Amino acid sequence: MSTSATVGNRFERRRAATRKALVRAARQILAETGDTSVSIQTIADRADVGFGSFYNHFESKTELFDAAVSDALEEFGQAIDKRLRETDDPAELIAAGFRLTARMADSHPDVMQILRHNGLVHIHSDKGAAPRARRDLERGIAIGRFTSVDPTIAVSALGGTLLSLVELRFSRPDLDGEEAAASLAEMALRMLGLPQGEAREIARHPLPHGDD
């Protein structure tokens, strides 16, 4: 490898590391307070990078915080995917998604706090749970598992219910999170057309093994 290529690769690695540090700092701020009015200097200090480095990667704080939310949403979606990779039934995928989200309030509190503070405006994002939910809904409708509904409207309903569950887990830690998640999953399945008994059973199936 030529010297210029080596220098170029080192530069790209450092550039990527700086961007990652800025996104990580923004995620920490979102998880802790949700306050996007902090100064760029505060973000740079937390990321341990120079103030000028910020504008090498982002044009504004809005762009950075959007990137931070997208990063957290994708981490959330991938965590759910990993746990449910062997599950095929769209109804089970929807129900298990609710229940795993409730558990992630304990296992991934930073991600869930970001979802809590910023999730509403990202219900139809192309990151996180939204595209996965739409995929499962469309497949469920296609195979007759769910009633024929507008997938966009259904994603809105499921997303709003999921966000209410996240808020419930943090604002009411005294409640049984497992039962709350199962109950909301049951309601979601009934909304999609499953009979009450089947919805209740699926919402309480043993979850696939894995780390929560």
Image (cartoon, helix red, strand yellow):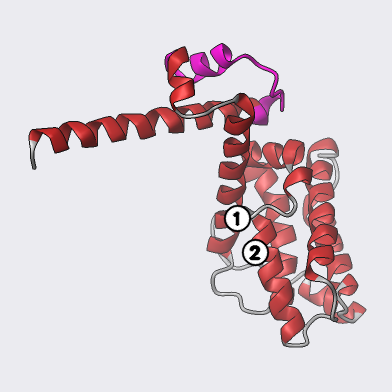
Q: What residue sits 23% from the left and 32% below the top?
A: 10
Q: Position of residue 119 (x, y in %)?
A: 74, 44
Q: Are marks 1 and 2 in contact (CB under 8 Å)?
A: yes
Q: Name the residue tied to disc 1.
A: 77
Rendered position, 129 above or below 116: below
Q: Position of residue 191 (x, y in %)?
A: 90, 71
Residue placed most toward the observer, 62 or 139? 62
Q: Position of residue 211 (x, y in %)?
A: 54, 55
Q: Amino acid at mark 2?
A: Arg
Q: Amino acid at mark 1?
A: Gly
Residue 137: name its quadrant: bottom right
Q: What residue sits 84% from the left and 48% below the top?
A: 164
Q: What residue sits 69% from the left and 24% below the top?
A: 36
Residue 176 in view of the camera: no
Count residues near mark 1 (Cα–Cα under 10 Å), then give few for <14, some for 14-19, many for 20+: some
Mark seen at residue 58: none
Mark 2 or mark 1, which is nearer the start of the sequence? 1
Q: What residue sits 52% from the left and 32% below the top?
A: 23
Residue placed most toward the observer, 18 or 145? 18
- Measure the alpha-carbon separation of dots 1 and 2: 8 Å
Residue placed most toward the observer, 69 or 90? 69
Q: Name the residue tied to disc 2.
A: 132
Image side of residue 180 versus residue 108, left or right? right
Secondary structure of the residue carrying tag 1 is helix
Residue extent of the magenta highlight: 30-50
